[in-house]
Image: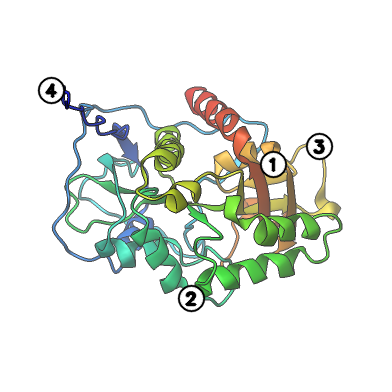
Amino acid sequence: MKSNTETLARPKRRRQRPKSWPITFSPFARSLARMHSLHAPKRRSQNPNPTRPVMKPQSSQSSHHHLDGVVGEDFSKPEHSESSGEDSDGIVQADFSFFDPKPDDFHGVKTLLQNYLYNEEWDLSDFVELILEQTTVGTVVKIEDDEDEGIFALVTALNFYRYREHRCIVTLKDFLLHKAHQEKGVVDKLRLLLVEQERDVALLVSQRMVNLPPQLLPPLYDALFDEVLWATEDEPTEELRNSFKFKHYIILSKVYVLKKAAQNDSEERIIYLNLEDEILHKLSSWSFYFPLQSQQLAPHELRNYRSMGLIMAVEADKIPKFRQELASLINEK
């Protein structure tokens, strides 16, 4: 005899929504975020947090400097004035929300990722499509009620084995192995992750516009790693569930490293473009640098530094520590 007790459905998990933060984009950076974005109806998401003004984010107090945001401005471009929505300090009050990636985000995400693989020629469109098709894990950040739907940040994690046959992933793996071939002890570890253990390895992708409020970072990364956990339980097939049981993350980053000839006690050895990369670097199992050919004019303050690519491998069991340290770092600001 069947029981009359009905099985209750699992409550729908809701993402933590960010609050309203002031942003300090110049007109050039703001226009870059909106470049090529499609004008499509927005799928609104509920935001339980009331909008309220906050103080302007302060500079980092970390032992290293940070140039936060990886989609940078051309330092040779002069600033232009913009009156709508900005005060004399260039601060704009904005209400950010997190959204699942969707096809209409293609051009905005592609613009955000235009320099992701440094200056390498590869199938970026294929890479963007992978990100947009994986709606279970991944988040884009937009401004509420912005009809242009500009993408201001993106975070996701892609399983190397699941997408191994895509041209963009093949190119990316070849690129990483090529850059690591002169690093003794690293190239073998990298090859182990990308070939023999690729079922358990994810590419952690995180890109954002210059000066995105750092207060958004903890909830953004929390959303990502919560979704990874939920996907191991909620995906419809065992194969998909297993594809999110990551043991390692590979992170591509960019830094400025002090030139040997200019090293002194008054200058930091490394300047991270993203402040969280300092934490990831410290927690990484291994990492290596390689020189970059910058297409932008560096500011005068960086004349003693060299632009470098930084590749890191972080074990998944270090992620709770990363989340804790990131939250602590932001709270100190």
**CA distance for labels 3 and 4:** 74 Å
Screen quadrant of the N terminus: top left
Q: Amino acid at mark 2?
A: Asp
Residue depicted at x 67% and y 50%: 312
Locate residue 93 relative to residue 72 in the image: left or right.
Answer: left
Give the labeled residue for mark 1: 284
- Upstream in sequence: badge 1 or badge 4: 4
Determine whether label 1 and label 4 are within 8 Å by CB: no
In this rendering, the label closer to the viewer, 3 or 2: 2
- Upstream in sequence: badge 1 or badge 2: 2
Tag 3's secondary structure?
A: loop
Give the labeled residue for mark 3: 265
Locate residue 10 relative to residue 218 in the image: left or right.
Answer: left
Give the labeled residue for mark 2: 123
- Front-lying residue, 233 or 177: 233
Tag 1's secondary structure?
A: loop
x, y (%) of residue 333?
Answer: 49, 26
Give the labeled residue for mark 4: 4
**CA distance for labels 1 and 4:** 53 Å
Give the residue at the far front of this rendering.
1
Residue depicted at x 43% and y 72%: 126
In this rendering, the label closer to the viewer, 1 or 4: 4
**How busy is the neighbourhood of tag 2: few (under 14 within 10 Å), some, or many (20 plus)?**
some
The relative height of residue 82 versus residue 108 in the rendered view (above or below) is: above
- Front-lying residue, 170 or 257: 170
Q: Amino acid at mark 1?
A: Ser
Tag 4's secondary structure?
A: loop
